[in-house]
Image (tube, helix red, strand yellow):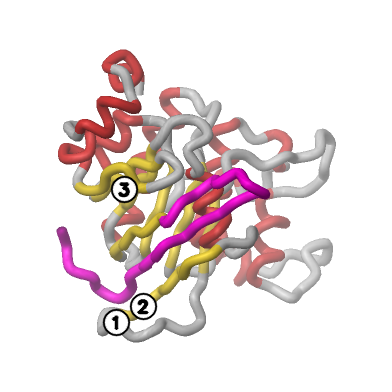
Amino acid sequence: MKACSLHCLKIENISVAIGDNAILRDVSLHAHCGELTAIIGKNGAGKSTLLRAILGEIPHTGTVFFSGHDGSPAGGLKIGYVPQSLSVDSGSPTTVYDMLASMISNYPVFLQRRQKTVSRLRDHLSAFNASHLLYKKLDRLSGGELQRVLLAAATLRKPDLLLLDEPVSGVDYSGLQLFYNILDSLKKSCDMVILIVSHDLDFVRRYADKVVLLNRRVEAAGSPDEVFKSGEFKRLFSITDAAKG
């Protein structure tokens, strides 16, 4: 396992319950910057719930701790988040430029576009094979295009922690490959902790540095090879499931 460079995410004993129903039980994990940590599990295992707990969107017990390379608390944590999908009203006039510009500028987006902002956004989008989408309306984007734009939006302000919740659900094969290649490039070039929830076991095998098998609690954790060969994985996933990814 690679040593931490600048940041580490430590989750200790996170539990979430709705009434008497335990959604998560004492979940602990340690994710390093410069690595991609994949969370896998069957439907209802609590994967998305864990991300929401990290984001502070739902009540939970336990701690979420973000530290610097020396183990001391890191202040001013910036989080990027890519959801499964984004609901866009049909006929909405909002463009990719409008969405991204509103994130980095106090200048009203309905006024004349500032060339400095245009250049910055075009350059940023180029890393996601999306610079040609700058003036395209959000409701006209394909599934793959929208997810690449959302990834660009999530990383626009250079987050310390990037959370992705099934970010390529419904995206076609070519869009999947492009998204995964971009994510792999981000992992190698950006000093951030990347945590992804994924059902795509083939992707996890190829790209993840660490895998966490979740079933309301952590059943197994380690390298992809270690987790996929574990008895816990074989118990939760049939050979057919694993082959399908």
Q: Give me the residue at 27% from left, 44% from top.
A: 220
Relative to 8, does residue 171 appear above or below in the rendering? above
Relative to 115, does residue 229 appear above or below in the rendering? above
Real-space Cα distance between discs 2 and 1? 5 Å
Q: Please, what is the three-letter code of the amino acid marked with disc 1?
A: Gly
Kindly identify which residue carries mark 2.
Answer: 67
214 relative position to 16: left or right: left
Pinpoint residue 54: horizontal percent, then vertical percent: 51, 61
Kindly identify which residue carries mark 3.
Answer: 184
Q: Please, what is the three-letter code of the amino acid marked with disc 3?
A: Asp
Mark 2–mark 1 contact, CB under 8 Å?
yes
Question: Which residues are drawn in magenta?
Answer: 1-26
* Mark 3 element type: helix
* Mark 1 element type: loop
Magenta span: chief secondary structure: strand
Q: Give me the residue at 36% from left, 59% from top.
A: 28
Viewer-proximal residue, 92 or 78?
A: 78
Viewer-proximal residue, 209 or 188?
A: 209
Pinpoint residue 187: horizontal percent, then vertical percent: 31, 55
Checking the image for residue 109, the label placed there is: none
Mark 1 neighbour density, 10 Å: few (under 14) some (14–19) many (20 or more): few
Checking the image for residue 71, the label placed there is: 1
Q: Quick one: label 2 or label 3, which is nearer the N terminus?
A: 2
Which picture quadrant has residue 208?
Answer: top left
